[in-house]
Image: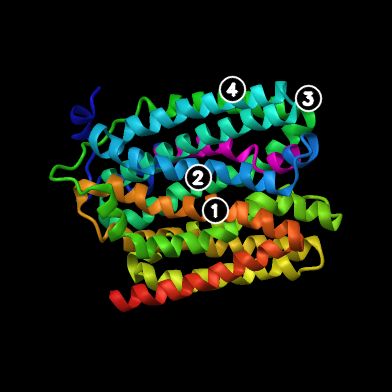
Amino acid sequence: MSNSTAAGAMPAAHGPVRSVFLQLLPLTLAVFVGFFMIGLPMPVLPLYVDGTLALGALAVGVVAGLQFAAALLSRAHAGAMTDRRGAKRAVVAGFVLGSIAGLFYLLADDLSARPQAALAALLAGRAVMGCAESLIVTGALSWGVGRVGPQNAGRVMAWVGVAIYAAYALGAPAGMRLYGASGFAGIGWASVLIPLAALALVLPQRGVRAAGGARTPFYRVLGMVWLPGLGLALSSVGFGMITGFVSLLFAERGWDGAAWMFTAFGAGFILARVFFAGLPDKLGGARVALACVLIEAAGQGLIWAGGTPAWALAGALLTGAGYSLAFPAFGVEAVRRVPAASRGAAMGAYVAFLDVALGLGSPAAGWLAGLQGYAAVYVLGGSCALAAMVVGMALRGKA
């Protein structure tokens, strides 16, 4: 079924028969399954690279950041594909690439006796996974906005984000258990097979028609959304510090239970979105963002200064809660700055700032950790969250 013939059955914005949540439910379930795959290796990769391959903290940062750098480089293509060929096709292509990334993980495991060769295969897998993530997120956000209308853009970002970070929260402990039971090969096989389940959910769903009208070049869209995108980038650094370095922080401090930091982050993230998902649409993105990044900064400070795992878990919870609404809050400001025909490009351009933050921030944090220890990266995360407040104030001034 083509996108054009499928589109008409989905009411976009004007008095939909079903609630926004129900219209988004099949899409968010598919995104959950796909990002469960992405969440599985998060706590495992630092241990595998630093432990099994014995390549050090800088290599950990490069491996963690490469996925986001690859996603950044593919955002323009993902946005163009979404606008021209349909959001559904972009999402399907993303899940196919996810399975291919899993094959590279399996190759890395086979080459583990040769660390440099294993690293090359692992980096290839991370690059492919970055392209997959780019297509899935860009397509899913555009698909959701096409279903329920741009006036619900904040809710779309909120519910798609719930699916993503619920998958991270559950996928990280599951990944640690799988790694303990079957090694990195188990992670690789799971990465190959799980996207197939997501495809089973996506393929029966009807697409939405691409908006008509002239499409703005990607570089111009990037210029339209740069200020809210900068806010997203700065507020995303703390998230990158948790995903990339919390396992090694716990090991450095002699603590157990690092995987539960992902669960605590995910719990804070999900609770904030369940109870407050509509606030950016109702109160304005800039106003909500100001409060959220302050909460995130407090969470990063607790992880840095907390002397027990309980304090670190509380910090992860606050980081998740603050970051949760920062993404849709800055995103509402981005969406309202672009025409409908370039909405997919806007989603790609906006999320590209997340890729910049994680693609550059993770290697920089790895260098910092090598000099000052793993706790120092949370000072970096908290400082960036406070800097995002300046962006929020600038956006309020332009409202």
Q: Position of residue 197 (x, y in %)?
A: 51, 26
Q: Amino acid at mark 2?
A: Ala
Residue type at tag 1: Leu
Identity, as a three-letter code, of the amino acid under mark 4: Leu
- Position of residue 278 measured from the top left corner of the image (x, y, whole percent): 39, 61
The residue beneath circle 2 is 69
Q: Earlier in the sequence, mark 3 or mark 4?
A: 4
Q: Nearer the viewer, mark 1 or mark 4?
A: 1
Say which residue label 3 marks: 113
- Name the residue rendered at 39%, 28% in the picture: 92
Using a 10 Å C-alpha cutoff, classify the residue at mark 1 as few (fewer than 14 neighbours), some (14 to 19) or many (20 or more).
some
- Residue in view at x 57 percent, y 35 percent: 126
Gap in angstroms between the C-alphas marked 2 and 3: 27 Å
Q: Residues within 10 Å of mark 4 (few under 14, many from 20)?
A: many
| Residue picked out by circle 1 | 360
- The vertical placement of 324 against 139, above or below, is below
Mark 4 — residue?
A: 103
Residue 363 visible at all: yes
- Frontmost residue, 150 versus 375: 375
Q: For residue 396, which quarter of the picture?
A: bottom left
The structure residue drawn at horizontal position 57% and vertical position 56%, both measured from the top left corner, is 361
- Give the crowd class for mark 3: few <14, some 14-19, many >=20 residues within 10 Å: few
Q: Is residue 28 magenta?
A: yes
